[in-house]
Amino acid sequence: PMDDPTLISRQQLFARIVGGLGGRAAEEIIFGDSEVTTGAAGDLQQITGLAKQMVVTFGMSDIGPWSLMDAAQSGDVIMR
């Protein structure tokens, strides 16, 4: 896996999430909680999508290495 640039590890994905939250965290630290802006909205959407992919598609969750996608249901998450 280390030689294949198309494979991304769980640790690398988590690092992307942490990095993406940096702008929002900086706003809270510098300006305070009451002055947080909408500037991080795009970052939060990307991070949310990545986290969802990690759990639903890639099976990278504490419930086990399962994909929660149901191909017959057009990509709906199986939560039964």
Image (tube, rainbow, N blue to C red):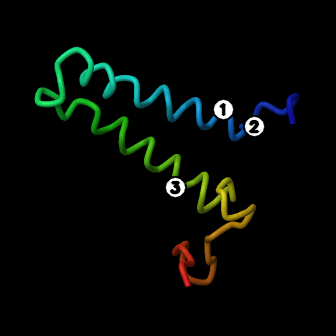
Q: Residues within 10 Å of mark 1 (few under 14, many from 20)?
A: few
Instruction: Measure the C-alpha gap from mark 3 to mark 1.
Output: 15 Å
Q: Position of residue 75 (x, y in %)?
A: 55, 72
Establish if 51 lies above or below 59.
Answer: above
Q: Viewer-nearest of labels 3 and 2?
A: 3
24 is higher (above) or lower (below) than 70: above
Tell which residue pokes out farthest to the left in this image.
Answer: 34
Query: What is the secondary structure assignment of the residue under circle 1?
Result: helix
Based on the displayed image, in which of its 4 quarters is residue 68 positioned? bottom right
Callout 2, which amino acid?
Thr
Q: Residue at x 32, y 38 (%)?
A: 42
Q: Identify the residue at image location x=75%, y=37%.
A: 6
What secondary structure is marked by label 2? loop
Q: Position of residue 33 (x, y in %)?
A: 18, 29
Write the residue at 62% across / 83% down: 72
Which label belongs to residue 52?
A: 3
Q: Amino acid at mark 1?
A: Gln
Identify which residue is drawn at 62% across, 77% down: 70
Image quarter of the C terminus: bottom right
Q: Residues within 10 Å of mark 3 (few under 14, many from 20)?
A: some
- The residue labelled by disc 1 is 12
Residue identifier under label 2: 6
Q: Which mark is residue 64?
A: none
Residue 43 pos. (x, y %): 37, 35
Q: Earlier in the sequence, mark 3 or mark 2?
A: 2
